[in-house]
Amino acid sequence: MTSLDEICRATPRAPFFLLLYVGADAERASRLRMAVGESAELREVFHASSREEATALVDRKDLRVGWLDGCLLVIWDLGDHPEKDIIGWLARLPRWPSGQVVAFLVAGTGPKLSSQDFLACVDRDFAGIGDFETCLTRVKQWCSPGKHPDFGLPFLKRPSRWLRDLKHDYIVNTVLIHRSSLADLGLLIVQREVDLIVNVLRNLMTSPDSKIEVRGLPAEYAEEESALYREVYSTPFRIVAPDSLAKLLAAEYVEGADFVVYRTMEEAVEMIDAAAREGYARILLQAPDTKLPHVQPRASGSGGLPIVLIAEQAQHLEWREWQAQLAANVIGSYPLSDLDKRRSSKPLLVAQRPYWRACAVLTLPGLFDRLIELLIRTWVTVREPKLKEYVFQSLAAIVSAKAVYLGQTGTGNGP
Protein backbone atom coordinates (compact mmCIF):
# COMPACT_ATOMS: atom_id res chain seq x y z
CA MET A 1 0.00 0.00 0.00
CA THR A 2 1.51 3.29 -1.10
CA SER A 3 0.25 6.32 0.80
CA LEU A 4 0.05 9.96 -0.10
CA ASP A 5 2.56 10.67 2.66
CA GLU A 6 5.05 8.24 1.13
CA ILE A 7 4.66 9.82 -2.30
CA CYS A 8 5.22 13.30 -0.86
CA ARG A 9 8.33 12.16 1.02
CA ALA A 10 9.70 10.60 -2.18
CA THR A 11 9.27 13.86 -4.12
CA PRO A 12 12.39 16.09 -4.34
CA ARG A 13 11.68 19.56 -3.03
CA ALA A 14 13.28 22.85 -2.04
CA PRO A 15 10.33 24.92 -0.72
CA PHE A 16 10.30 28.66 -0.15
CA PHE A 17 7.68 31.33 0.48
CA LEU A 18 7.09 35.01 -0.06
CA LEU A 19 4.58 36.76 2.19
CA LEU A 20 2.49 39.78 1.27
CA TYR A 21 0.46 41.15 4.18
CA VAL A 22 -2.10 43.79 3.24
CA GLY A 23 -3.29 45.36 6.47
CA ALA A 24 -2.55 48.01 9.05
CA ASP A 25 -1.84 45.69 12.02
CA ALA A 26 1.93 45.41 12.50
CA GLU A 27 1.54 42.81 15.27
CA ARG A 28 -0.45 40.52 12.97
CA ALA A 29 2.16 40.97 10.27
CA SER A 30 4.83 39.88 12.75
CA ARG A 31 2.87 36.79 13.82
CA LEU A 32 2.43 35.74 10.20
CA ARG A 33 6.12 36.21 9.53
CA MET A 34 6.96 33.96 12.49
CA ALA A 35 4.38 31.32 11.49
CA VAL A 36 5.91 30.93 8.03
CA GLY A 37 9.52 31.18 9.14
CA GLU A 38 9.18 28.52 11.85
CA SER A 39 8.85 25.64 9.38
CA ALA A 40 9.86 26.94 5.95
CA GLU A 41 12.25 29.26 4.15
CA LEU A 42 10.70 32.73 4.11
CA ARG A 43 12.61 34.62 1.44
CA GLU A 44 10.94 37.99 1.67
CA VAL A 45 8.09 39.80 3.40
CA PHE A 46 6.10 42.62 1.81
CA HIS A 47 3.77 44.82 3.84
CA ALA A 48 1.11 47.12 2.38
CA SER A 49 -1.13 49.03 4.78
CA SER A 50 -3.75 49.99 2.18
CA ARG A 51 -5.28 48.87 -1.09
CA GLU A 52 -3.35 51.59 -2.90
CA GLU A 53 -0.02 50.38 -1.51
CA ALA A 54 -0.89 46.79 -2.44
CA THR A 55 -1.80 47.83 -5.98
CA ALA A 56 1.53 49.62 -6.32
CA LEU A 57 3.37 46.49 -5.19
CA VAL A 58 1.97 43.99 -7.68
CA ASP A 59 4.10 45.19 -10.59
CA ARG A 60 7.32 44.43 -8.73
CA LYS A 61 9.20 41.58 -10.34
CA ASP A 62 10.45 40.31 -6.99
CA LEU A 63 6.84 39.52 -6.02
CA ARG A 64 6.53 36.98 -8.80
CA VAL A 65 7.09 33.29 -8.09
CA GLY A 66 7.72 31.13 -11.13
CA TRP A 67 9.15 27.98 -9.52
CA LEU A 68 6.81 25.14 -8.52
CA ASP A 69 8.60 24.85 -5.16
CA GLY A 70 7.74 28.44 -4.27
CA CYS A 71 4.55 30.18 -3.24
CA LEU A 72 3.43 33.74 -2.65
CA LEU A 73 1.06 33.91 0.34
CA VAL A 74 -1.25 36.95 0.21
CA ILE A 75 -3.08 37.81 3.43
CA TRP A 76 -5.69 40.52 2.83
CA ASP A 77 -6.57 42.09 6.18
CA LEU A 78 -8.18 45.47 5.65
CA GLY A 79 -11.23 45.00 7.86
CA ASP A 80 -14.71 43.56 7.51
CA HIS A 81 -16.75 44.07 4.36
CA PRO A 82 -20.51 44.08 3.81
CA GLU A 83 -21.90 40.84 2.45
CA LYS A 84 -23.27 42.40 -0.72
CA ASP A 85 -19.92 44.00 -1.57
CA ILE A 86 -17.58 41.07 -0.97
CA ILE A 87 -17.35 39.66 -4.51
CA GLY A 88 -17.25 43.08 -6.11
CA TRP A 89 -14.47 43.97 -3.71
CA LEU A 90 -12.52 40.85 -4.63
CA ALA A 91 -13.06 41.51 -8.32
CA ARG A 92 -11.45 44.94 -7.95
CA LEU A 93 -8.26 43.42 -6.57
CA PRO A 94 -5.41 43.27 -9.05
CA ARG A 95 -4.87 39.87 -10.59
CA TRP A 96 -1.63 38.86 -8.95
CA PRO A 97 1.13 38.51 -11.55
CA SER A 98 2.72 35.62 -9.70
CA GLY A 99 2.22 32.17 -11.16
CA GLN A 100 2.22 30.76 -7.63
CA VAL A 101 -0.20 32.56 -5.32
CA VAL A 102 -2.61 31.55 -2.58
CA ALA A 103 -4.61 34.20 -0.74
CA PHE A 104 -6.63 34.37 2.48
CA LEU A 105 -9.21 37.04 3.24
CA VAL A 106 -9.29 38.03 6.92
CA ALA A 107 -12.82 38.97 7.97
CA GLY A 108 -13.62 38.99 11.68
CA THR A 109 -17.29 38.04 11.48
CA GLY A 110 -16.98 36.19 8.18
CA PRO A 111 -19.04 37.49 5.25
CA LYS A 112 -22.08 35.46 4.25
CA LEU A 113 -21.80 34.36 0.63
CA SER A 114 -24.05 32.71 -1.90
CA SER A 115 -22.72 29.42 -3.25
CA GLN A 116 -21.78 31.22 -6.48
CA ASP A 117 -19.90 33.85 -4.45
CA PHE A 118 -18.04 31.11 -2.58
CA LEU A 119 -16.93 29.59 -5.88
CA ALA A 120 -16.05 33.05 -7.23
CA CYS A 121 -13.73 33.60 -4.27
CA VAL A 122 -11.84 30.41 -5.15
CA ASP A 123 -11.71 31.67 -8.73
CA ARG A 124 -9.92 34.75 -7.36
CA ASP A 125 -7.28 32.41 -5.86
CA PHE A 126 -8.55 32.74 -2.29
CA ALA A 127 -8.21 29.49 -0.36
CA GLY A 128 -10.03 30.70 2.73
CA ILE A 129 -12.03 33.39 4.48
CA GLY A 130 -12.21 33.73 8.25
CA ASP A 131 -10.88 35.47 11.32
CA PHE A 132 -7.19 36.11 11.85
CA GLU A 133 -6.61 33.11 14.13
CA THR A 134 -8.11 30.81 11.49
CA CYS A 135 -5.86 32.44 8.92
CA LEU A 136 -2.81 31.89 11.12
CA THR A 137 -3.71 28.21 11.56
CA ARG A 138 -4.12 27.74 7.81
CA VAL A 139 -0.80 29.41 7.05
CA LYS A 140 0.98 27.11 9.51
CA GLN A 141 -0.64 24.08 7.87
CA TRP A 142 0.25 25.22 4.37
CA CYS A 143 3.89 25.77 5.31
CA SER A 144 4.46 22.67 7.48
CA PRO A 145 6.01 19.69 5.67
CA GLY A 146 3.92 16.56 5.96
CA LYS A 147 0.62 18.33 6.66
CA HIS A 148 -1.39 18.09 3.47
CA PRO A 149 -1.99 20.22 1.56
CA ASP A 150 1.63 21.27 1.96
CA PHE A 151 2.39 24.25 -0.25
CA GLY A 152 6.08 23.54 -0.12
CA LEU A 153 5.52 20.65 -2.51
CA PRO A 154 6.44 21.23 -6.19
CA PHE A 155 3.06 21.78 -7.86
CA LEU A 156 1.03 24.73 -9.08
CA LYS A 157 -0.21 26.75 -6.11
CA ARG A 158 -3.25 28.58 -7.47
CA PRO A 159 -6.76 27.60 -6.28
CA SER A 160 -8.44 28.86 -9.46
CA ARG A 161 -6.45 26.35 -11.54
CA TRP A 162 -6.48 23.15 -9.46
CA LEU A 163 -9.52 21.57 -11.10
CA ARG A 164 -9.29 23.39 -14.43
CA ASP A 165 -5.69 22.48 -15.22
CA LEU A 166 -5.83 18.76 -14.48
CA LYS A 167 -7.60 18.07 -17.76
CA HIS A 168 -5.57 20.60 -19.76
CA ASP A 169 -2.09 19.82 -18.49
CA TYR A 170 -2.34 16.16 -17.60
CA ILE A 171 -5.22 14.43 -19.36
CA VAL A 172 -5.17 16.07 -22.79
CA ASN A 173 -1.53 16.98 -23.25
CA THR A 174 -0.08 13.85 -21.68
CA VAL A 175 -2.45 10.88 -21.63
CA LEU A 176 -3.15 10.78 -25.35
CA ILE A 177 0.56 11.19 -26.14
CA HIS A 178 1.37 8.23 -23.86
CA ARG A 179 -1.70 6.22 -24.90
CA SER A 180 0.11 3.03 -25.92
CA SER A 181 2.31 2.87 -22.82
CA LEU A 182 -0.65 3.56 -20.53
CA ALA A 183 -2.62 0.84 -22.27
CA ASP A 184 0.26 -1.61 -21.78
CA LEU A 185 0.28 -0.76 -18.05
CA GLY A 186 -3.47 -1.25 -17.79
CA LEU A 187 -3.96 2.44 -17.01
CA LEU A 188 -5.93 3.71 -20.01
CA ILE A 189 -9.31 2.94 -18.44
CA VAL A 190 -8.04 4.51 -15.21
CA GLN A 191 -7.33 7.74 -17.07
CA ARG A 192 -10.80 7.65 -18.64
CA GLU A 193 -12.26 7.48 -15.14
CA VAL A 194 -10.00 10.34 -14.03
CA ASP A 195 -11.35 12.41 -16.90
CA LEU A 196 -14.97 11.50 -16.07
CA ILE A 197 -14.60 12.58 -12.43
CA VAL A 198 -12.75 15.78 -13.26
CA ASN A 199 -15.41 16.67 -15.82
CA VAL A 200 -18.10 16.28 -13.13
CA LEU A 201 -16.19 18.35 -10.57
CA ARG A 202 -15.40 21.12 -13.02
CA ASN A 203 -19.01 21.49 -14.13
CA LEU A 204 -20.23 21.55 -10.54
CA MET A 205 -17.62 23.86 -9.05
CA THR A 206 -15.42 25.74 -11.48
CA SER A 207 -17.95 26.74 -14.12
CA PRO A 208 -21.47 26.49 -12.62
CA ASP A 209 -22.42 29.94 -13.94
CA SER A 210 -20.84 29.52 -17.35
CA LYS A 211 -23.13 29.40 -20.37
CA ILE A 212 -20.98 26.62 -21.82
CA GLU A 213 -20.52 23.21 -20.23
CA VAL A 214 -16.99 21.95 -19.70
CA ARG A 215 -16.21 19.04 -22.02
CA GLY A 216 -14.14 15.97 -21.25
CA LEU A 217 -12.27 13.65 -23.57
CA PRO A 218 -14.09 12.46 -26.71
CA ALA A 219 -16.85 9.89 -26.08
CA GLU A 220 -15.47 6.70 -24.58
CA TYR A 221 -14.87 3.67 -26.74
CA ALA A 222 -16.82 0.70 -25.42
CA GLU A 223 -13.61 -1.17 -24.62
CA GLU A 224 -12.32 1.81 -22.62
CA GLU A 225 -15.39 2.49 -20.48
CA SER A 226 -14.60 2.55 -16.79
CA ALA A 227 -16.78 0.74 -14.26
CA LEU A 228 -17.81 4.10 -12.81
CA TYR A 229 -18.85 5.38 -16.25
CA ARG A 230 -21.05 2.32 -16.79
CA GLU A 231 -22.58 2.59 -13.33
CA VAL A 232 -23.36 6.31 -13.61
CA TYR A 233 -24.97 6.09 -17.05
CA SER A 234 -26.67 2.71 -16.72
CA THR A 235 -28.38 3.41 -13.38
CA PRO A 236 -31.83 4.98 -13.84
CA PHE A 237 -32.04 8.43 -12.27
CA ARG A 238 -34.96 10.19 -10.60
CA ILE A 239 -35.37 13.76 -9.39
CA VAL A 240 -37.39 14.26 -6.20
CA ALA A 241 -38.65 17.85 -6.17
CA PRO A 242 -41.20 20.13 -4.45
CA ASP A 243 -44.52 20.36 -6.27
CA SER A 244 -43.86 24.04 -7.02
CA LEU A 245 -41.32 22.85 -9.64
CA ALA A 246 -43.65 20.34 -11.30
CA LYS A 247 -44.46 22.51 -14.32
CA LEU A 248 -40.81 23.44 -14.91
CA LEU A 249 -39.67 19.81 -14.71
CA ALA A 250 -42.53 18.55 -16.87
CA ALA A 251 -41.28 20.71 -19.74
CA GLU A 252 -38.16 18.49 -19.93
CA TYR A 253 -38.97 15.22 -18.15
CA VAL A 254 -41.70 12.60 -17.61
CA GLU A 255 -43.40 12.79 -14.22
CA GLY A 256 -43.47 9.48 -12.37
CA ALA A 257 -40.40 8.21 -14.22
CA ASP A 258 -37.79 10.96 -14.48
CA PHE A 259 -39.14 12.98 -11.55
CA VAL A 260 -41.68 12.91 -8.75
CA VAL A 261 -42.95 15.82 -6.67
CA TYR A 262 -43.71 16.12 -2.97
CA ARG A 263 -45.76 18.47 -0.81
CA THR A 264 -44.14 17.70 2.55
CA MET A 265 -40.70 16.52 3.55
CA GLU A 266 -42.27 13.33 4.91
CA GLU A 267 -43.54 12.61 1.40
CA ALA A 268 -40.07 13.36 0.07
CA VAL A 269 -38.57 10.70 2.34
CA GLU A 270 -41.12 8.14 1.13
CA MET A 271 -40.31 8.96 -2.50
CA ILE A 272 -36.56 8.76 -1.89
CA ASP A 273 -37.02 5.39 -0.21
CA ALA A 274 -39.26 4.07 -2.99
CA ALA A 275 -36.81 5.16 -5.69
CA ALA A 276 -33.98 3.36 -3.89
CA ARG A 277 -36.01 0.14 -3.69
CA GLU A 278 -36.68 0.40 -7.44
CA GLY A 279 -32.96 0.74 -8.18
CA TYR A 280 -32.90 4.46 -8.98
CA ALA A 281 -30.11 6.89 -8.23
CA ARG A 282 -31.81 9.97 -6.80
CA ILE A 283 -31.33 13.66 -6.23
CA LEU A 284 -33.40 15.83 -3.93
CA LEU A 285 -34.34 19.40 -4.83
CA GLN A 286 -35.03 21.08 -1.50
CA ALA A 287 -35.71 24.49 0.00
CA PRO A 288 -32.86 25.59 2.34
CA ASP A 289 -35.27 26.30 5.22
CA THR A 290 -36.76 22.79 5.24
CA LYS A 291 -35.32 19.81 7.05
CA LEU A 292 -35.26 16.29 5.68
CA PRO A 293 -36.53 13.79 8.27
CA HIS A 294 -34.48 10.71 8.98
CA VAL A 295 -33.95 8.61 5.86
CA GLN A 296 -33.90 4.87 6.44
CA PRO A 297 -30.57 3.16 5.62
CA ARG A 298 -32.05 1.38 2.60
CA ALA A 299 -32.87 4.78 1.11
CA SER A 300 -29.28 5.89 1.08
CA GLY A 301 -28.52 3.80 -2.00
CA SER A 302 -24.98 3.06 -3.15
CA GLY A 303 -23.65 6.59 -3.05
CA GLY A 304 -25.73 8.75 -0.78
CA LEU A 305 -28.30 11.41 -1.53
CA PRO A 306 -27.15 14.52 -3.42
CA ILE A 307 -29.13 17.67 -2.61
CA VAL A 308 -29.64 20.85 -4.61
CA LEU A 309 -31.02 23.78 -2.63
CA ILE A 310 -33.56 25.96 -4.42
CA ALA A 311 -35.33 29.02 -2.99
CA GLU A 312 -36.77 32.40 -3.97
CA GLN A 313 -33.48 34.01 -2.93
CA ALA A 314 -30.00 32.50 -2.96
CA GLN A 315 -28.90 31.05 0.36
CA HIS A 316 -26.01 32.88 2.05
CA LEU A 317 -23.55 31.12 4.36
CA GLU A 318 -20.04 31.65 5.72
CA TRP A 319 -17.05 30.06 3.98
CA ARG A 320 -16.71 27.16 6.41
CA GLU A 321 -20.48 26.54 6.21
CA TRP A 322 -20.31 26.12 2.43
CA GLN A 323 -17.43 23.70 2.89
CA ALA A 324 -19.61 21.68 5.29
CA GLN A 325 -22.50 21.70 2.80
CA LEU A 326 -20.35 20.41 -0.04
CA ALA A 327 -18.87 17.77 2.25
CA ALA A 328 -22.45 16.65 3.03
CA ASN A 329 -23.17 16.19 -0.72
CA VAL A 330 -25.09 19.46 -1.16
CA ILE A 331 -23.97 20.00 -4.74
CA GLY A 332 -25.73 23.19 -5.72
CA SER A 333 -27.73 26.14 -4.45
CA TYR A 334 -29.79 28.32 -6.77
CA PRO A 335 -32.38 31.06 -6.59
CA LEU A 336 -35.50 30.18 -8.58
CA SER A 337 -34.61 32.76 -11.21
CA ASP A 338 -31.46 30.80 -12.09
CA LEU A 339 -33.47 27.78 -13.20
CA ASP A 340 -34.41 29.67 -16.36
CA LYS A 341 -30.75 29.99 -17.32
CA ARG A 342 -29.30 27.86 -20.10
CA ARG A 343 -25.97 26.09 -20.52
CA SER A 344 -24.85 24.90 -23.94
CA SER A 345 -28.36 25.80 -25.20
CA LYS A 346 -29.96 23.50 -22.60
CA PRO A 347 -32.00 24.47 -19.51
CA LEU A 348 -29.96 24.37 -16.29
CA LEU A 349 -32.03 21.42 -14.97
CA VAL A 350 -31.02 19.44 -18.06
CA ALA A 351 -27.42 20.63 -18.43
CA GLN A 352 -26.45 19.85 -14.83
CA ARG A 353 -28.29 16.53 -14.60
CA PRO A 354 -25.37 14.32 -15.79
CA TYR A 355 -23.13 15.77 -13.10
CA TRP A 356 -25.78 15.57 -10.38
CA ARG A 357 -26.37 11.90 -11.12
CA ALA A 358 -22.67 11.11 -10.72
CA CYS A 359 -22.95 12.39 -7.13
CA ALA A 360 -25.79 9.92 -6.56
CA VAL A 361 -23.44 7.05 -7.39
CA LEU A 362 -20.47 8.50 -5.52
CA THR A 363 -20.89 11.45 -3.17
CA LEU A 364 -18.97 14.64 -3.88
CA PRO A 365 -16.35 13.72 -1.23
CA GLY A 366 -16.37 10.20 -2.69
CA LEU A 367 -15.56 11.54 -6.15
CA PHE A 368 -12.58 13.46 -4.75
CA ASP A 369 -11.39 10.38 -2.84
CA ARG A 370 -11.77 8.14 -5.88
CA LEU A 371 -9.86 10.63 -8.02
CA ILE A 372 -7.03 10.76 -5.48
CA GLU A 373 -6.92 6.94 -5.34
CA LEU A 374 -6.70 6.74 -9.14
CA LEU A 375 -3.89 9.30 -9.28
CA ILE A 376 -1.97 7.44 -6.57
CA ARG A 377 -2.41 4.21 -8.52
CA THR A 378 -1.19 5.90 -11.69
CA TRP A 379 1.84 7.42 -9.92
CA VAL A 380 2.80 4.02 -8.49
CA THR A 381 2.47 2.24 -11.83
CA VAL A 382 4.08 4.58 -14.36
CA ARG A 383 7.85 4.46 -14.76
CA GLU A 384 8.75 7.37 -17.07
CA PRO A 385 10.09 10.13 -14.75
CA LYS A 386 8.47 13.08 -16.51
CA LEU A 387 5.08 11.38 -16.60
CA LYS A 388 5.46 10.51 -12.91
CA GLU A 389 6.13 14.19 -12.22
CA TYR A 390 2.99 15.25 -14.11
CA VAL A 391 0.88 12.77 -12.16
CA PHE A 392 2.28 14.01 -8.85
CA GLN A 393 1.48 17.63 -9.72
CA SER A 394 -2.10 16.62 -10.50
CA LEU A 395 -2.36 14.61 -7.29
CA ALA A 396 -1.12 17.48 -5.11
CA ALA A 397 -3.49 19.90 -6.83
CA ILE A 398 -6.54 17.67 -6.25
CA VAL A 399 -5.66 17.10 -2.58
CA SER A 400 -5.41 20.88 -2.18
CA ALA A 401 -8.68 21.45 -4.06
CA LYS A 402 -10.48 19.00 -1.77
CA ALA A 403 -9.22 20.90 1.27
CA VAL A 404 -10.43 24.23 -0.12
CA TYR A 405 -13.83 23.13 -1.40
CA LEU A 406 -14.75 20.59 1.29
CA GLY A 407 -12.56 21.57 4.22
CA GLN A 408 -11.04 18.08 4.04
CA THR A 409 -7.64 16.71 3.06
CA GLY A 410 -7.21 13.79 0.70
CA THR A 411 -7.18 10.08 1.35
CA GLY A 412 -3.83 8.81 2.50
CA ASN A 413 -3.64 5.34 1.01
CA GLY A 414 -3.32 4.01 -2.46
CA PRO A 415 -3.25 0.55 -4.02
Image (cartoon, grey):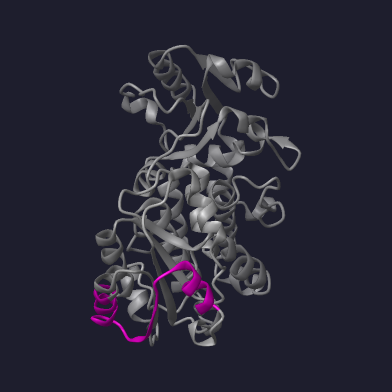
Front-lying residue, 268 or 129? 129
Residue 97 picture location, percent across and down: 56, 76
The vertical placement of 312 against 214, above or below, is above
Front-lying residue, 387 or 116? 116
The reply to whether residue 244 is in sight is yes
> Who's the residue at 60% across and 16% down the image?
246
The vertical placement of 307 against 158, above or below, is above
The reply to whether residue 147 is in sight is no
Residue 258 picture location, percent across and down: 61, 23
Q: Does 354 appear in magenta?
A: no
The vertical placement of 292 against 98, above or below, is above
How many marks on residues? Answer: 0
Front-lying residue, 50 or 128? 50
Q: Is residue 45 left or right of residue 210?
A: left
> Who's the residue at 58% across and 27% down the image?
336
Q: Does 49 appear in magenta?
A: yes
Which residue is at the far right?
A: 345
The vertical placement of 70 against 262, above or below, is below
Front-lying residue, 390 or 191? 390
Q: In this view, does 358 lie to the left or right of 288?
A: right
Residue 153 picture location, percent across and down: 40, 77
> Who's the residue at 63% across and 22% down the image?
249
Residue 174 picture location, percent across and down: 63, 73
What range of the chain is rendered magenta? Answer: 30-58
Q: In which quarter of the image is the C terminus?
A: bottom left
Q: In which quarter of the image is the N terminus?
A: bottom left
Picture quadrant where residue 353 is located: top right
